[in-house]
Amino acid sequence: MKMLVVFEKHPRIRHIGHLDLMRAMQRALRRSGLPVKFSQGFNPHLLITFAAPLSVGMPGKHEIMEIPLAAEVSESEFLTKLNAALPPELNCLSARGVEDKHPASMASLYAAEYEIKIAPEGAALCDAVASFMAQETIMALRKTKSGEKLIDIKPLIYKLEVTSPATLRCTLALSEAATCKCDLLLDALCAHAGIEDRPHTLSIRLQMYGKDFIPLELL
């Protein structure tokens, strides 16, 4: 059995990196006294997997991790004990027990929804969204290990809309096969709008989805 856990990473701790987040979860699980499973070998460690790491500086509203268990525990007890060991800025929202053979969240991941808050001086970005999405192709420079590569990100943008004068909401590809990050989208949008210096933004990951845009925690 393993527990599929949905947790929130608050804006206050958004600059904590993925490895530090993992260590914080491992320490909390040890303190909680929950029957979690450890790896074999000379240096046993807790087996935790995350659906997708968050970029440094990005909060997450519905992040997902999987925790294998060495013994059965109720979902309510798991949630209560883990939250008691975690700081309030890193709280678990739900827990669901699934079989070990249940498909891994990382492998089922297809897309993610984001909210992007834009500083007032960047309002022109919102004005450019309609013409930006009307293009047949949206070319952007993606950095790779071998250098920069020009790609068409239009097929990777499933939705992009303005929800307020300084806020965008988008759903972007996020899978092993194809990914579009918020920074890549914003750079392309700035280039289209003729803005050389990208305004300050705060991107928040709201939700992750599997195929057919079903929330990942419901698969």
Image (spheres, rainbow, N blue to C red):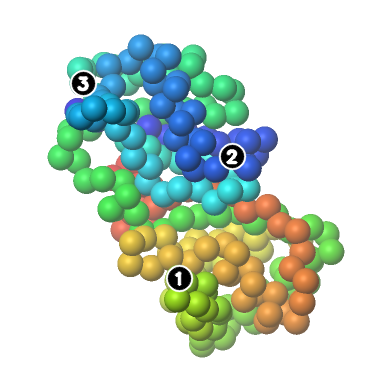
Are the residues tagged 3 and 1 within 8 Å (C-beta)? no
Q: Tell me the kind of residue under disc 3.
A: Ala
Q: Position of residue 170 (x, y in %)?
A: 55, 61
Residue visible at 47% across and 72% down in the picture: 144
Going from N to C along the chain, the mark reached first, 2 or 1, is: 2
- The 10 Å Cα crowd at callout 3, few under 14, some 14 to 19, many 20 or more, is few
Residue 151 higher or lower than 75, as above or below: below
Are the residues tagged 3 and 2 within 8 Å (C-beta)? no
- The 10 Å Cα crowd at callout 2, few under 14, some 14 to 19, many 20 or more, is some
Of residues 166 and 177, the one nearer the viewer is: 177
Q: How many marks?
A: 3
Going from N to C along the chain, the mark reached first, 3 or 1, is: 3
Residue 203 higher or lower than 47, as above or below: below
Q: Tell me the kind of residue under disc 1.
A: Lys
Residue visible at 37% across and 37% down in the picture: 65
Q: Residue furthest left?
A: 101
Where residue 212 sits, quadrant-wise, is: bottom left
List the residue tagged with mark 1. Answer: 145
List the residue tagged with mark 2. Answer: 16
Specify the label residue 2 is tagged with: none
Q: Is residue 211 visible?
A: yes
Q: Position of residue 47 (x, y in %)?
A: 30, 32
Going from N to C along the chain, the mark reached first, 3 or 2, is: 2
Residue visible at 54% across and 29% down in the picture: 90
- Find the distance from the CA under tag 3 to the CA under tag 1: 39 Å
Q: Position of residue 141 (x, y in %)?
A: 55, 78
- Left or right: residue 158 compared with residue 129: left
Where residue 162 sits, quadrant-wise, is: bottom right
Q: Nearer the viewer, mark 3 or mark 1?
A: 1
List the residue tagged with mark 3. Answer: 70
Of residues 20 and 166, the one nearer the viewer is: 20
- Label 1 sits on a secondary structure element that is loop
